[in-house]
Amino acid sequence: MNIKEKYEMSKKEYEKWGLDVDKILEELSRVKISIHCWQGDDVTGFEKTQNALSGGIAATGNYPGKARNGEELRKDLDKALSLIPGKHKVNLHAIYAETDGEVVERDQLKPEHFKKWVDWAKKNGLGLDFNPTIFSHPKAADGLTLSSPNKEIRDFWIRHCMASRSIGEYFGRELGQTCLTNIWIPDGYKDVPSDRMGPRKRLKESLDEIFSQKIDKKYNLDCVESKVFGLGAEAYTVGSSEFYISYAARNNIMSLMDTGHYHPTEVVSDKLSAMLLFNDKVALHVSRPVRWDSDHVILFDDEIKELSKEIVRNNALGRVIIGLDFFDASINRIAAWTIGSRNMIKSLLSAMLTPNDKLKELQDTGNFTERLALMEEFKTYPMGDIWNYYCEKNNVPVAEKWLDNVKDYERTELSKRS
Ligand code: RNT
Ligand code: ZN
């Protein structure tokens, strides 16, 4: 049997449950994932001063062949995108500006420094998202940025965030797809603070100033990303969950939840429904924490499946903005992008191939036996045949065949980089 025949056979299993599989694949192909550029170079960026990665995050490993400039990074992204079904967005950080060898301070960045990215995105029909880079910089060296007691430091980062929002607006206008600009800061303390309110108050004031700059929401939407702790900020994080959820709600901007930014037994899949009841839109960084916010490549594991179920069964594909955030420097970086992105899409498909209405009804009628029984049986339904057909239909390699492309690329391109 070929892929199509297997699809036709397996789709009947789902149709028995009233699921229209052809329609589901159409719907899936409209979902855009925001694929983070920083997996391609371990969050290094192109700044001439080459500041080491800081902010309590870390990319470990030294797999050869990482991208060293815009041309290489875009080439690598082209390769990865050719292995991921669907049309997506690419998520940039300010450190990926291209300044023609000139040193441009982050508070002086302009849309023109991202022209090459925009031209590339246009050519490939991609959207772009953006992030100010508020780490890996001398002005973030003491671990405090927008909440710093030093006004000069705060002002520098405020200007950087404003510049970033203008760049986001430029992306949105040029590409006809709204850009999401996400603010994440590393601010916190290694040890027990003697003042928790002060830094949070300063962060609030800095954000107020940043968002006083009016930007057209048609082109750029803003979000703020919370965190529980980072390396070197173990005792206290200024931008905590409560802080940002409250700030975002009050100021009509979006909250971003990173799946690695909570205590180990907390899961974002359980948070989403609550957020969706009170917010028009919610943003995600899908990542995989292993013992800490380690940003491992995401797997097709239980939590990602649960997360996708919560998006799909609440009809929230249009309201949850899905971004990826992992960076593993110990494996081939194109493979890392491909595995993680395919898993994200695969988990959405798995959620769509679930009789969610039936399962809800079983819960409401107190039939927990049948709810459990069906949820377990569905785990071994023939989703692989549907997924393979989806890949074939979208002109990307089926099953593990993408690995050959990555190996070829490693031979012809990555191995030539010193
Ligand atoms: C850090 C945050 C943040 C970064 C990226 C590079 O813990 O998750 O989103 O990973 O901006
Ligand atoms: Zn994140």
Image (spheres, helix red, strand yellow):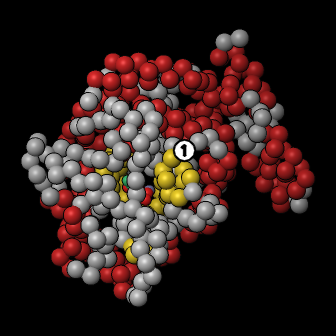
- Please, which residue is most extreme toward the left here? 102
How crowded pointer 1 is (Cα within 10 Å; few <14, some 14-19, many 20+) is rated as: many
Would you identify the image quadrant in which residue 36 lies?
top left
Q: Position of residue 192 (x, y in %)?
A: 45, 82
Q: In the image, is residue 85 above or below residue 351?
A: above
- Closest to the observer, 366 or 145: 145
Left or right: residue 196 compared with residue 317:
left
Q: Position of residue 151 (x, y in %)?
A: 20, 80
Q: Position of residue 197 (x, y in %)?
A: 41, 86
Would you identify the image quadrant in which residue 145 lies?
bottom left
- Closest to the observer, 418 or 116: 418
The residue that disc 1 covers is 298
Figure quarter occupied by ligand 1: bottom left
- Residue at 32% across, 81% down: 202
Q: Position of residue 301 (x, y in %)?
A: 65, 44
- Visible residue check, residue 383: yes
Left or right: residue 89 compared with residue 383:
left
State which quarter of the image contains the C terminus. top left
Three-letter amino acid code at disc 1? Ile
- Closest to the observer, 98 or 322: 98
- Tag 1, which secondary structure? loop
- Residue at 48% across, 19% down: 404
